[in-house]
Image (cartoon, rainbow, N blue to C red):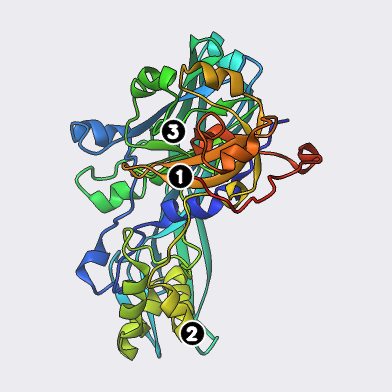
Amino acid sequence: MAELKPERVKEISDAVLYEGHFLYPYRLSALKNRQRWTFGRLYPRAYGEAQRSVDAWFMQTECLVLGRPETRLGVRVRFLQLMEGMDVDGVPPNRAEVVPIHEDLFHSRQEPVEREVIIADLPFAELLSSPKLVSFAFPTSREGEPFLGSSCRADGQVVRRRWPLEGTLELSARCTGVACFKLTVRVSNLTRLHGADPTDRDAVLLRTLLSAHSILEVREGRFVSLLDPPEPLGPLAAGCHNVGTWPVLVGEEGERDMMLSAPMILYDYPRVAPESPGDFFDGTEVDELLTLRVLTLTDEEKREVRAMDGYARALLDRTERLTREQVLRLHGALRSEVPPALQPGARVRLRPRGRSDAMDLILSGKTATIICAEQDDEGRIHLAVTVDEDPGQDLGWEGQPGHRFYFRPEEVEPLAVEEEGPHEPPADPHRRGG
């Protein structure tokens, strides 16, 4: 059974899911927080078509997969669903109202709940024979719980209501060449409006998929980067038609078994900076700027922030606990573009691709040792290597032509420990040729 492993992409997926959930200054009284700013909205089809497709009701991902009919596919679609404005006993619902209850503030803003649609262990052979259409639905629900103020006493009843959602996930694949498939994943919102006023955007949002994105994973196959495809696959990659979303490779650098298709343009292997203390939600704004801004909020403003929801409270508490050193870390950092496994002295296996040089064909599959990383005029990184079986390997360290070769980081594979075996490095591995 091919299992999806969302933990490998959860951090960046969560960032996509909640980006734009609310904006600085994180107060409902701020005009911009009376609307939603999340990316990737899929409105009900009836509403989208009435808007002449200005507001999308579906998203489509197309990408290339290298594999066989036996290659297995897993798909996880994630999105947020809004809950009806929370009501307190005796207080009429109002989607943008802040209500004082004793010494606390309570707001009736619509709040999100996470939703997922999962398909696992699907062989490409099935998709090649016919498309697969999967329907999904989330029924209406209503739940209540006591509203606990800061005094921890029950100050009323909180009622949450969710309207039903309906949609489809359509998968298809076609062969584009030897061991190469074009995969299409289409997510549609087919929720009926159930008498909701189609001109009332807040009512429509209760039936909308927010921050919709998908995580794709293959087993016994590899995805092709659409940003940097191998030269022979360039035209096929350019022909992929993505609507409202953009797929990129995710996971560890060099891994090609997972893609994130998000409603924003990212680069391959996106990551949340390790210096970031947590989510700030504010439309990809700078963490350092937001941190300093939050620290300048007045006590009354902080009281409003805490009334927003649990995410706002956590943001405020986390920011107030930051030490001076943690704030300074947000100012910036320099990073090497070469992963630790590809540092000078590391042994690798050569996997040249996208070139027709006869020497590349000869060197393919051979083991080599990295001398250094160099950057060309266009900012691209190249690894200088010497081939382990070359009797003149030491000449490669001296920069002699014919003994030093250049490969891009994605054209080499770090050797596993069991593959390393005995290896005598050059007498002086610190020598660097020009």
In the figure, residue 56 lies in which quadrant? top left
In the figure, residue 417 lies in which quadrant? top right
**Which callout, 3 or 1, points to the residue nearer the camera?**
1
Other residues around mark 1 within 10 Å, as few (<14) / some (14–19) / many (≥20) = few
**Label 2 or label 1, whichever comes before in sequence order:** 2
**Label 3 or label 1, whichever comes before in sequence order:** 3
Q: Which mark is residue 20?
A: none
Other residues around mark 3 within 10 Å, as few (<14) / some (14–19) / many (≥20) = many
**Label 2 or label 3, whichever comes before in sequence order:** 3
420 over 68 or under it: above or below: below
Could you tell me the amino acid type at mark 2? Thr
268 over 332 or under it: above or below: above
Spatial CA distance of label 3 from label 1 is: 60 Å
Q: Which mark is residue 167?
A: 3
Q: Which residue is mark 2?
A: 323
- Seen at 36% across and 37% down, the residue is 245
In x, y percent, where is residue 373? 49, 46
**Quarter of the image that includes the C terminus:** top left
In the image, 406: left or right of 92? right
Which secondary structure lies at badge 1? loop
Could you tell me the amino acid type at mark 1? Gly
